[in-house]
Amino acid sequence: MPMKLLIVEDDKEAAAYLVKAFRETGHVADTAADGLDGYAMAREGAYDVLIIDRMLPKLDGLSLIHGLREQKVETPVLILSALGQVDDRVKGLRAGGDDYLAKPYAFSELLARVEVLARRRRAGPAEETLYRVGDLELDRLARRVTREGKPIDLQPREFRLLEYLMRHAGQVVTRTMLLENVWDYHFDPQTNVIDVHLSRLRGKIDKGFDRPLIHTVRGAGYMVRDGAR
Amino acid sequence: MTALGKLFRTTAFKLSAAYLVIFAIFAAVLLGYIAFNTRRLIAEQVSGAVDAEIQGLAEQYQAGGVPRLVSVIDARTRLPGSSLYLLLAPRGVRLAGNVGRVGPDVMLSPGQRIIRYSHADDDNGEHEALVRVFELQGGFRLLVGRDLSESDRLRFVIRRAFGWSLSLVVVMALLGGWFVTRRVLGRIDSMTDTTRGIMEGNLAGRLAIAGTNDEFDRLAGNLNLMLDRVEELMAGLKQVSDNVAHDLKTPLTRLRNGAEEALRTAQSPDDYRGALEKIIEEADNLIRVFNALLMIARAEAGNAREGMAEFDVAEVARDVAELYEPVAEEAGVTLTVEVPDQVRLFGSRELVGQALANLVDNALKYAPVGKDAATQPAVSVQAMRRDDMVDLVVSDTGPGIPEADRARVLDRFVRLENSRSRPGFGLGLSLAAAVARLHGGALRLEDNGPGLRAVVSLPVRRGGG
């Protein structure tokens, strides 16, 4: 589903690059070059997600977000910043941002995060209790996973990992998104720890079945999807 | 600036001048007090002597009238150091006495006063005297008094003493000032010279210590310590920039070479794609190095305190172990966790997590190195409460780090020879050490016999360090 995005970024080249990249992936993006323009456009337009740089002329990113939230504009916001430290991130989220991405970033990472934000907005706050992808079922209340009706035994962390993947079925989920959302850490794990966890989960979910449901998206991350569809 | 101008500007000169003024005032007050009291004492004595004379003369007068008075006065005036007398008949005719001339009104009004007079025997000059004048029966007038030139002499002596002591004070002050200038300012000047030399680039220069253990020695000692620290930091900075240059230039060169080679040799879109993917990978590595360096710098500068809160460090240890558990399994390493249920700690959960992750990552990397097949490589993660500290211990059964290298590996970018072949940037341990210091703790590397035992000791209480 195409998204309508607003990019508030004073670096013209970076903004143009993002517009082009989003267009190539089937989305529409407007740009604003300073905080005040960004504020006006965010209030007027119906955007799915706002991508806001932290350091902007005229009105800085955090004040812009704060202003929007005060005006009851609840469009999801992803903050882009050259400041990537933990406390910067905390400040950004406290100001009303929904996600935080440090520069320099991979576009695939940005896209994955924006898609998650957009979908969360469309789906609303209510969360389903049963996720189903193909013949795989995850019951959040009973904490039970079955494939083709047969129960699959998962460790608690594996359950949460699969839960996150299935909640975002059909969407790319990056390694850092998994570390942030399943483990709640934002640090650099040095090694490909997430991949090892995924391959273990894969061993339990896909092994012995014809159709794999957990897919690796090259250069981006993972996606749970029923391949047949 | 003239030499004199420079002198006026010195602290020693100002100090000497201040002391000079204080001493002078002191001496003046003291001498003034003495002079005042002496004069009062003399005046009392003079007044008493005059009273006694009058008493005696009154008795003579009562006994024999004016003629007796005249003979007594005559007799007394012949004695040396006598008092002053003058007896006049009603018409002003002089009957007896040793006072020559007095002012015209002196004899007319009775009472005590200080007058100027000249002696009957010598006319050279007037003197001061304290006199008392009486009117006797029949119009006779009597003056009795004492010369005050003694008191004049005293005043002179005091004035001279005053002059002498003042000059003495000035001389002493000048001498003292000179001494202070030579001694104190000499040392300060030498300090100034040395520090200027250091500022001009002679970083090895140090202040001289006289060995007297006085304030100057203590100041010089502290300044020297400060200079040592500065030199150490400078050396560290130089080392870091050298290392940064090396460790960032290497991947940058690889990145550039890869791009160049692709331009030169790539034939198909697939070749280009492969080359670009490699370039992105190199760029990502560079970004990770930068991020790690920034994190270390911020932890060392103490800037990360803002994100601090209370958290359960035992949970973080469990999380990190759990995060790496599949990696350990894949590498054939036994990973054991031994932590209490809960250890509350004030600090940055993310940074402590990152530090632990670095240590576990290292341990997993080295645990299987150089092992014979018989022993199972193992890594353990432990958390232990010890008084006010919590020890986070990550130990492995790998080759360990020789004692001589343990301090060095905590520096940035230091990678021991046998680790060059393995992935990593040489920042993991530096970051862990910086995080420990940020929390007021320390990272210790110990022998696990065999293997390495890395201990992050953190104070449990808030505000450590």
Image (spheres, coloured by chain):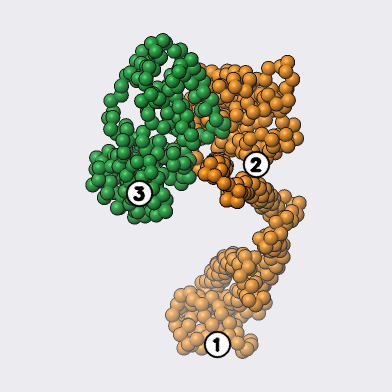
Secondary structure, mark 1, is: strand
Residue type indicated by callout 3: Val
Quadrant in the picture for residue B340: top right
Q: Would you name the residue on which mark 3 appears?
A: A8
> Which corner quadrant holds the N terminus of chain B?
bottom right
**Mark 1 residue type:** Arg
Rendering colour (chain B):
orange
Is disc 2 surrounded by few (<14), some (14 to 19) or many (20+) residues within 10 Å?
many
Residue occupying the point 51% across, 77% down: B114
Question: Which amino acid does the dot numbered 2 rest on?
Answer: Phe
Chain coloured green here: A
Q: Identify which residue is drawn at 44% across, 38% down.
A: A109
Mark 1 vs 3: CB contact within 8 A: no
Name which residue lies at 70% across and 56% down.
B203
Residue farthest to the top, as pictured: A150
Dots 3 and 2 on the same chain = no
Mark 3 to mark 2 CA distance (whole Å): 37 Å
Q: Position of residue B164 (x, y in %)?
A: 67, 72
- Crowd class of label 1 (few under 14; some 14 to 19; many from 20; radius 10 Å): some
The residue beneath circle 2 is B413
**Closer to us: B146 or B404:** B404
